[in-house]
Image (cartoon, rainbow, N blue to C red):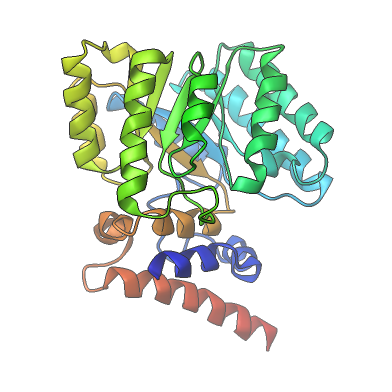
Amino acid sequence: MLKGVFISLSQNQLLTTAAKKYGLKLGAQTVVAGTTVEETIKSIRKLNALGISATIDNLGEYSIEREEALEAKASILEVIESIHTNGVDAHISLKPTQLGLDIDYDFCYENLLEIVAAASKYNMHINIDMEDYDHLQPSFDLMDDLLKEYDNVGTVIQAYFDRAQDDLEKYKDLRMRIVKGAYKEPIEYAFQTKEDIDENFIKLIEYHLIHGKFTSIATHDHRIIDQVKKFVKENNIPNDKFEFQMLYGFRKDMQVDLAKQGYNFCTYVPFGDDWYAYFMRRLAERPQNLNLVVKQVFNKRTNTAIGVLAGALALKTLVNKKKK
């Protein structure tokens, strides 16, 4: 039920628009690295100093106007140049819908091509984030077209899709991030229970660790992390074949500890003012994430679930007051 609430909140355009206006005042400032490129680079320097790399996400999705998509492209190109100029250890994650996939496929492809070409000059990786099922195959199509010209491209496999194994086998020669999945998908093509998703998640991770080029294991679940540690040791998989990934602001101590243990670690670093849908979806994809951010996002006297929902309601109240 709570997942459905947060998914609904993440899709509320009124609240999303208001969140941009009012800024990071409702508890998200510790899970978003900044609203500007400069602030984000400072945050990444701190991560790098701890032995942690970063993948940077310019927040935003579902552009419906060409101008929006072009602005997003310009922002991502600015980030690429800033990564290079500042010499930080980071690469780019991006969403095709932010770059115009819902507007026109060819328009989106041209935007992506410009970004991938710019990153290629600096030997920088571009990760194409996967979104909901309706955009799944078009996103794979975009990657296929990009791979005809460049090799610095990878993507994401979402474990809750029943087609995930086939997709992973097809793209085993690419750098891949494996996740559980953050959207609410129908039973026709997605596993629904935590047990089924976790089982498939581990199956995909182990397959790609053995057969794949490079595996990014994106999870905050310490039980799965411990299982991966055991698996790589038993199968003599070198550390340079994989990395752990977590979201910026979540389980900070574990992130640092894994890096200290000698594992490659990469933090998913979101930035920008379009933070609201991202934040709500992070809380929706795994209810336990509420517990992970309570001490970092809310004060000690605030109950987590109540605090997040109250924040959303407070934002709605601000909007309603403005209307009056």
Q: Is residue 304 found left or right of 113 in the rendered image?
A: left
At a point 57% along the width and 26% down the height, the residue shown is 82
Q: Relative to 175, is 313 above or below?
A: below
115 and 88: which one is in front?
115
305 and 47: which one is in front?
305
* Rendering coords of residue 209 (x, y %): 34, 19
At a point 31% along the width and 40% down the height, the residue shown is 199
Q: Relative to 290, is 89 above or below?
A: above
Q: Relative to 226, is 187 above or below?
A: below
Quarter holding the C terminus is bottom right
At a point 64% along the width and 11% down the height, the residue shown is 121
* Rendering coords of residue 153 (x, y %): 58, 20
* Rendering coords of residue 201 (x, y %): 36, 37
Camera sees residue 29: no
At a point 65% along the width and 64% down the height, the residue shown is 17
Q: Is residue 276 found left or right of 50 in the rendered image?
A: right
Based on the displayed image, in which of its 4 quarters is residue 221 positioned? top left
Camera sees residue 109: yes
